[in-house]
Image (tube, helix red, strand yellow):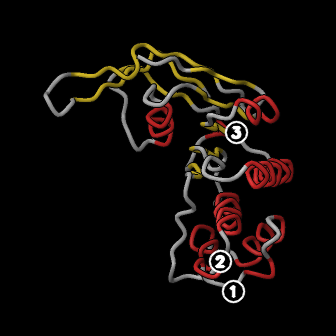
Amino acid sequence: MRLENVSKSYTSHDKDTVKVFENLSLVFPKGEVSCITGPSGCGKTTLLNLIAGVLKPEGGSIVFEEKEKGPVSYLFQEPRLLPWRTVLENCTLVCDDIERAKHFLELAKLSDKANRFPSELSGGERQRAAIARAFCYRSNVILMDEPFQNLDKNLKEELASLFFKMLKEDKRTVIWVSHDLELANTYAKKVIDLTSR
């Protein structure tokens, strides 16, 4: 995947135009993990939303390789599970395939919690359920917006290790926003630092 001369701006509350990107060009290796770092407010989440198609660039283009085209999976800081659905139902919501969902829940070490509701899980278990759901979705690209950020060090390392083990089972292009340079250097093939405006 690559960005070619992408520009994006916002209109502030006082009607000023704030440029987030101007003629930004980047390459993300297909089937590899790329990590985007940088200070708060430099446009990391905006970049993910442009790639996801949630936002449209004012200029330039985002080009997907043939095997990257189609919908994307998205992992957020918070799990964003539907509280009225069980863990298994949260996964089948995006893939409509019970066996596929059970497979990824097993990889996420949640087989025994499949019929529980999110309120019955710990914070780490809820994030594992969100990771399983991201893999259940039949996408070629996974976008991650700091999914390990609000966790203590041990749990952060445990969940990152789990995610990247699952990625070996189901290879995809991953674009990952993180402030954690140690994790980024451990798992990412490419680290891109976005400087502040």
Q: Secondary structure at mark 2?
A: helix
Q: Secondary structure at mark 1?
A: loop
Q: Does label 1 or label 3 sit earlier along the sequence?
A: 1
- Which of the 4 image quadrants contains residue 36? top right
Q: Amino acid at mark 2?
A: Val
Q: Residues within 10 Å of mark 2 (few under 14, many from 20)?
A: many
Q: Please name the residue that numbered disc 1 is placed on.
A: 115
Label 2 to label 1: alpha-carbon separation: 6 Å
Q: Is residue 153 left or right of residue 79?
A: right
Q: Does label 2 or label 3 sit earlier along the sequence?
A: 2
Residue at image position (52%, 64%) is: 80
Q: Does label 2 or label 1 sit earlier along the sequence?
A: 2
Mark number displayed over residue 87: 2
Q: Position of residue 191 (x, y in %)?
A: 69, 24
Mark number displayed over residue 173: 3
Image: 116 above or below 62: below
Q: Amino acid at mark 3?
A: Thr
- Which of the 4 image quadrants contains residue 175? top right
Q: Position of residue 182 (x, y in %)?
A: 76, 32
Label 1 to label 3: alpha-carbon separation: 30 Å
- Camera-near label (2 vs 3) is 2
